[in-house]
Amino acid sequence: MAQLRNTRSAVSKSAVPKSPVPKLAVPKSAVSKSPVPKSARQKCKNTGTKFEELSAEIVLEIFDYLVAHEICNSFYGLNSRFKQLVSNATNVRLDLTRTETKLFRTFQKIFNEQHVISLKLLYENINLLEIFSHSKRLQSIALYEVPLSAFENDIPTLLNAFKHQLRDLHIAFSNMKFTGSGERAGQSFGYLLTELPFLTNLKLECSKGIDLITYMPSTIVNNTIRSLTIQIAERRRLIPLLYRFQKLKVLTLFTLYTGGSREKKAQPAENIRYYRDQISEKTSMEYPAKLRHLILHTGAYLGVVQELLPLITPPTLFTFSFVHKRTPVKIPIPRRQPPFLDSTQWHDMMKTFLPPKMRELHIEYDDVDDTMSRTNPERVKKEFIQYYGEDFLLEVFFSYDKDTKLMSFDVHFI
């Protein structure tokens, strides 16, 4: 209606035809009067809601997706209303990995400690964990730069206050230097598996793999963890380790070996060898029979991947994501190093080891030059259809990012 009212002023006189306009063409009432009440027009004008005008419920729900320092920096000083909303946030996620201890005191003045549900800490500031020892809502803890000696001696005691509420635990080790035979490291690992009854997500990482803490008696098993993320250097540790997770559904595995190294490894000391020899570990393939989703990050050559897949692809597997951290080539390395997706060995390996119930296959790898990304996709798509058959393939998607040089395929099976 506003447009109709301004029609005469918007159109120049020269553009108006000399012949009279019929009275019915533009009704006088449409120009002079608006059928919309003033109150309604004002209401429509205000419907372009600004962020500051959102309800408290919506704002607090948005806060649930942000960490505490993001909330403070963006909203705490906005106005008095938002200052109060920030102070009343009920699902606070504290990331203190890049925060000085004195700045944490500021967070304490803003947030209620009983409202913190997630906490990330450097181990050097582990004393801050004691502040939340009486909190009943802290469900997720991530500890970074944890020396193995501290894992052996302190971690069970520190986590004991949260044993009946902890659901997510992430430990990033700074080293794998254990004391004695390694038995104490195994005992602490066993604590995570047996003394945290509500733990469902566990992530353990170390730049050299967590292999050395995985030596435990076979009697130590877990029946609560559904999602596991680990870094392993030697594939022979997989079966004894995975056997312990009887209810595992999602496995994210980072493999650190390349298969090309022939360096001789130092033998363990006598006390370490004796301890390991006394452990009765399961070595059969009867580990988590209900694994549904597998995410494999590796830098290994195709032959090593082929040795690994039988260990981690049970018949129940539903989705498989294969993430390669360098251009995956066959040995001997050909002159032009194409991705091994267009090799017969790759397709034969997939058909051999991927179970019939598989429905989704995601593949991505880095360091793919632009020329390769233009010449390979269509051929790879055709070979997928050729090897798997049109009756089994539903869709094949391809993408390539020129900035990151990341090539990916998504294959959906019928």
Image (cartoon, rainbow, N blue to C red):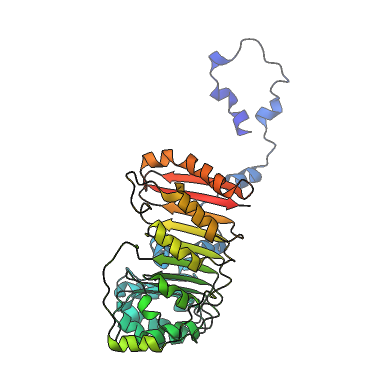
Camera-side residue of 47 and 63: 63
Q: Quadrant of residue 374?
A: top left
Camera-side residue of 132 and 409: 409
* In the rendered image, the vertical position of residue 219 relative to residue 5, given as above or below: below
Quadrant housing the N terminus: top right
Q: Residue furthest top?
A: 19
Residue at 58 percent across and 28 percent down: it is 6
Q: Position of residue 53 (x, y in %)?
A: 53, 56
Q: Relative to residue 108, is residue 3 drawn left or right?
A: right
Q: Relative to residue 311, is residue 8 drawn left or right?
A: right
Camera-side residue of 371 and 261: 261
Residue at 49 percent across and 57 percent down: it is 349
Q: Residue furthest right?
A: 24
Q: Position of residue 304 (x, y in %)?
A: 40, 62
Q: How many marks?
A: 0
Is residue 309 at all visible to an observer of this figure?
Answer: yes
* In the rendered image, the vertical position of residue 73 relative to residue 373, given as above or below: below
Residue at 56 percent across and 45 percent down: it is 385
Q: Position of residue 168 (x, y in %)?
A: 48, 74
Q: Position of residue 348 (x, y in %)?
A: 51, 54
Q: Quadrant of residue 226?
A: bottom right
Is residue 180 at all visible to an observer of this figure?
Answer: no
* In the rendered image, the vertical position of residue 158 relative to residue 87, given as above or below: below
